Amino acid sequence: MPQPSATPDPVASITANTAADIAEAIRDLVDTGQLRPGAGLPPVRTLAEQLEVNRNTVVAAYGLLVQAGVAVTRGRAGTQIVDLQPLPQEGFSNVTGMLDIASGNPDPALLPPASKALAELAADEPVLYGQPVIDPDLAQWATEVLSADVGPAELTVTAGSADAVQRLLADSLTIGDAVGFEQPCFLTTLQTAQAAGYRPVPIPVDAQGPTVAGLRAALDDGIRAVVVTPRAQNPTGAVISQNRADELSALLCDYPYVLIIEDDHFWQLSRHPYRSIIPPNHPRWTLIRSVSKSLGPDLRVGLVGSDPLTASRLGAHIRSGAMWVSHILQRLTYLLTTNPDTPAQLEHACTEYARANARLIAALDDHGISARAADGVNVWIDLHRVASPVVQAMGNRGWLVRDGAEFSLDSNDDAVHHIRVTVHQLSNNQLDEFVADLAAVLGDSSPMTSS
């Protein structure tokens, strides 16, 4: 929750009338402690009326504050002074003494072993300046894989899917632009939008994927880009159905300027087919496929297929900064993926994730607790009540779980009634203990009898 300001209304003292001066005045209030971390800034219209300036002047001032890292946009919650408290991170926890089932990590035991591929790397020639930025073998293989699903595509390699989304949005948007995000939303994607100063517009997700009504409302709200997950949506596990994909695609036909970003992060492990919402001949589109879940999060490699203009902008963005993704990582990705043993290992991993999730869902159902996990490594549990007290109570019992509110673009969203857990590394006994503890916390410690 935003913290109260040090004075009743410190912003009321501002008399500036240019964007730069307004931003500087707010920075002075922050530096002197009059605006504390987490404090909310007035709505744009309110401050514009107070200062008797055009609202675009205030928008620009807030944009300067975001660029400087002083403020962050929170969608409908407005613009706030950056809270110095650490933001939730996917796969990371600094909490000790609890069993962590909040991480969203793949199971290390289910990742293909890298020792043989690493040994092959030792014999490779070093890559120097001026050589192709994409490993030739990886380029040929990845282009074939992407083109099989989306047709002719220009290939770019990024440092994972989150890096790709961040760069793609930066290449196409400016501060304050509206972007459509799934609601609930993947943590890293949500934080990218907030840190860059984009205006996130929520598109609700149901069992068939982003809703048509949600996308239509977002388009009416003026979004310039939309980020969707075709399968294994994080955190809900939703998979876009063919009917829903067709409906969303038909709707997007009338918006050729909207950049469509599909983050297909679970592509090597999913049992569901890839169903795209990109309309035929759409001029701005991207399909991202990373290897974090299948080969390991430390392989920071994202395979990005897109239209030529988007690829050109993305490539230029990378060359002006990181220059290229390490050829060692690219080569390792290629060797691991094309190893003859890898397909069977990935199939085994897919089976194990699905088995663990199904067992948890069945055990929860015995206690009248609903949960879903159509795809992916996580289970989305509906508590039918605000999750935060349950998260704390489960922590007292030794379980670290992820509060659904962390994935929410809107505090009024139903995500606040959920928790997300990753249980594939639990033993059967541990899983049963978790279910019993959750049922007890929810006030139902005895299984329901079947009729």
Image: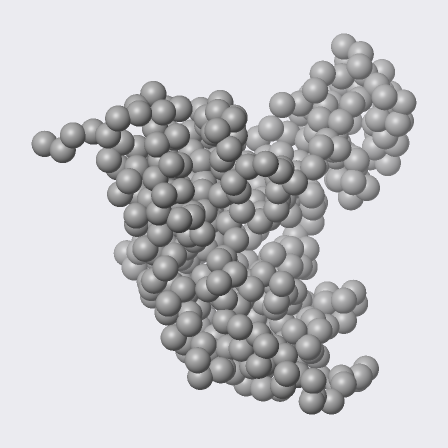
* Relative to 55, 401 lies left or right: left
* Relative to 266, 59 lies left or right: right
Q: How is the image coloured?
A: one colour
Report the front residue among 14 and 390.
390
Residue 17 position, x and y percent, is: 85, 28
Residue drawn at x 65%, y 40% is 94
Check the picture and name the quadrant holding the N terminus.
top right
Report the front residue among 237 and 347.
347
Report the front residue among 296 and 249.
296
Quadrant position of residue 415 = top left
Quadrant position of residue 367 = top left
* Relative to 258, 38 lies left or right: right
Check the picture and name the quadrant holding the C terminus.
top left
Report the front residue among 437 and 270.
437
- Direction front: furthest residue: 429
Residue 264 position, x and y percent, is: 47, 62
- Direction left: furthest residue: 451
- Direction top: furthest residue: 8
Q: Please give the count of numbered marks on the rendered protein.
A: 0
Residue drawn at x 85%, y 16% is 13
Q: Is residue 330 above or below residue 287?
A: below
* Relative to 313, 254 lies left or right: left
Residue 252 position, x and y percent, is: 43, 56
Residue drawn at x 60%, y 28% is 77
Q: Is residue 5 above or below residue 19?
A: above
Task: Tell me, yes or no, if residue 231 can be seen here.
Answer: yes
Task: Tell me, yes or no, if residue 52 can be seen here.
Answer: no
Residue 319 position, x and y percent, is: 76, 71
